[in-house]
C-alpha cells in the first residue's frame, strides 16, 4: 500500500511539473503587450508653440506654415495664419515662439499696415501685418479685434485674437 501511495504521489508531482512547463512554454508564444512612454511629433499647445524659422522674422508679425509643419514664415494677405511671432529670429532654422491664434488667454501685439480704429475687426494684410476690413477683392482671414488704435503703417496695435475666420471680399 505504501508503494501504491508513493507511486500516486510521484505521478501527481510529474503531472504538476508537466503542467507548469506547458504554461511557461505557452506564455512564450502568446502575444505580449509592453507599455512605455514614447516621443511623438504630435503635441498639444496651451498658448504658444516653438517652430523653426524659414528665414529672418520680425517680432509681432503674423506667421503661416513654411517649408513644412515645423517651420514658419511671414504670412501674406491671403494666407491662413497660424499665429504671430513673439521673437525675431535672425536666420533660417532658428527657433521662434509663435502665439497660436485662437488659443490665447491674453491680447497680442501685432503690426498695422494702415490706420486702424479701436474695436474694429482686423484681418491679414501683406507682409504679416493686419488691416481693417479690406476693400480689394480676395480671401482674407480675420484674426481678432483692435483694442488700441493704429495711426499708420508700422504701428504696434493690441489685438484681442480669435481663431482665423475666412472672409471673402
Image: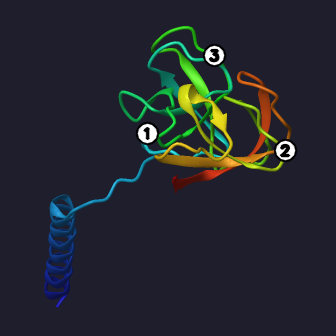
Mark closest to the chain's N terminus, 2 or 1? 1
How far separated are the C-alphas under marks 2 and 1?
Answer: 44 Å
Q: CA distance from mark 1 to mark 3?
A: 28 Å
Quadrant (top left, top right, bottom left, bottom right) of the N terminus? bottom left
Q: Which residue is mark 2?
A: 118
Circle nearer the viewer, 3 or 2: 2
Label 1: which residue? 39
Left or right relative to 32: residue 49: right
Q: Mark 3 or mark 1, which is nearer the start of the sequence?
A: 1
Secondary element at tag 1: loop
Q: Is residue 127 visible in this depiction of the protein?
A: yes
The residue carrying mark 3 is: 88
Asked if one can make out residue 50 in the rendered structure from this viewpoint, the answer is: no
Q: Which mark is residue 75?
A: none
Taking the spot 79% from the left edge, 32% from the top edge, the residue there is: 157
Q: Residue at x 86, y 38 (%)?
A: 148
Q: Nearer the viewer, residue 58 or 145?
A: 145
Residue 50, given in percent of the width and then of the height, sits at 57, 30
Q: Residue at x 51, y 31 (%)?
A: 75
Question: At 78% across and 26% down in the image, what residue appears?
Answer: 156
Which residue is at the front of the view, 125 or 95?
125
Closer to viewer: mark 2 or mark 1? 2
How many residues crowd around disc 3 within 10 Å: few (fewer than 14), some, or many (20 or more)?
Answer: some
Q: Secondary structure at mark 3?
A: loop
> Which residue is at the far bottom?
1
Amino acid at each position: 500500500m505504501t508503494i501504491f501511495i508513493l507511486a500516486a504521489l510521484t505521478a501527481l508531482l510529474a503531472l504538476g511539473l508537466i503542467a507548469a512547463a506547458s504554461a511557461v512554454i505557452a506564455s512564450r508564444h502568446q502575444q505580449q503587450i509592453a507599455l512605455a512612454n514614447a516621443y511623438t511629433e504630435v503635441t498639444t499647445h496651451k498658448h504658444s508653440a516653438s517652430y523653426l524659422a524659414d528665414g529672418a522674422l520680425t517680432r509681432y508679425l503674423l506667421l503661416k506654415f513654411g517649408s513644412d509643419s515645423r517651420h514658419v514664415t511671414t504670412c501674406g494677405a491671403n494666407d491662413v495664419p497660424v499665429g504671430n511671432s513673439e521673437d525675431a529670429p535672425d536666420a533660417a532654422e532658428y527657433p521662434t515662439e509663435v502665439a497660436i491664434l485662437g488659443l490665447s488667454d491674453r491680447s497680442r501685439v501685432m503690426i498695422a499696415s494702415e490706420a486702424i480704429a479701436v474695436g474694429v475687426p482686423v484681418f491679414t494684410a501683406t507682409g504679416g501685418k493686419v488691416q481693417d476690413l479690406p476693400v480689394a477683392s480676395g480671401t482674407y482671414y480675420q484674426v481678432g479685434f483692435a483694442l488700441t488704435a493704429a495711426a499708420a503703417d508700422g504701428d504696434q496695435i493690441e489685438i484681442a485674437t480669435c481663431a482665423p475666420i475666412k472672409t471673402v471680399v
